[in-house]
Amino acid sequence: MTNQPSSPPCGAAEADDVYIGYAGRNELLLVLNELLEAERAGAKVALASTKAVADDYAALMRQVRDDEAHWCEMLDRQIRRLGGTPSAATGAFREKALAIADPLERLAFLNRGQGWVVRKLVELLPRVRDDALHADLNAMVAGHRTNIDIANAFHSSGS
C-alpha cells in the first residue's frame, strides 16, 4: 500500500496555485502587462507635464515620472522572470490625461490613475504566491500611496 493522501487537503502543498486560490502564471502576466501599460502612460503624462509653468509643479511631475519609470522597469523584469513578454503598448490613460490642459486638473486625474493602480494591486496581492513578486508589488503599492499623498498635498495647497 502506498502512502497516498486520504483527502484533497492533504495534498494541498502539491496542488497547482490556481486550485488553491492563487493567481496562475497567465493571469499574473495579464495583470502585470496591464499595469506596465498604465505605468508607462503615467510616466509619459508626467514627463509631458514637466513643461508646466510653475517650477514646483514641474519638479513634482519629474518625481512622479521617475517613480513610474521605476515601476515600469520592475514590472518588465518580473514579467520576463515569469517567462512572459512585456507589452510595448501605452495605456489609453495617456491620451485622456494629456487632453486635460489645466495642470491641477491633470494632476488630479493622474492621482486617480495612481489610485486605480493601488486598488488593482491590493486586489491582486492576496493571490500572489511568489515571494519576490509579492514584495515588489507591495513596494509598488507603498510608492503609489506616497505619490497620492504628495499630489493631494500639492493640490490642496493650490500650488
Image (cartoon, rainbow, N blue to C red):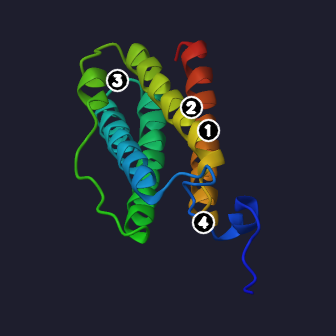
The kind of residue tagged 3 is Val
* Mark 1 vs mark 2, CA separation in Å: 5 Å
Residue pointed to by mark 3: 53
* Tag 2 secondary structure: helix
- Mark 1 packing: few (<14 Cα in 10 Å), some, or many (20+)? some
- Using residue 36 as the reference point, say whether residue 87 is left or right of it: left
* Mark 4 vs mark 2, CA separation in Å: 20 Å
Indicate the quadrant where residue 81 lies. Answer: bottom left
Q: Quadrant of the N terminus?
A: bottom right
Residue pointed to by mark 2: 119
Of the two numbered discs 3 and 4 in the rendering, the one whose residue sits closer to the viewer: 4
Residue pointed to by mark 4: 132
Indicate the quadrant where residue 151 lies. Answer: top right
Give the mark nearer the N terminus: 1 vs 4.
1
Give the mark nearer the N terminus: 3 vs 2.
3
* Mark 1 vs mark 3, CA separation in Å: 35 Å
Question: Which sits in the foreground, 47 or 8?
Answer: 8
Question: Which sits in the foreground, 21 or 135?
Answer: 21
Res 122 label: 1
- Using residue 60 as the reference point, say whether residue 157 is left or right of it: right
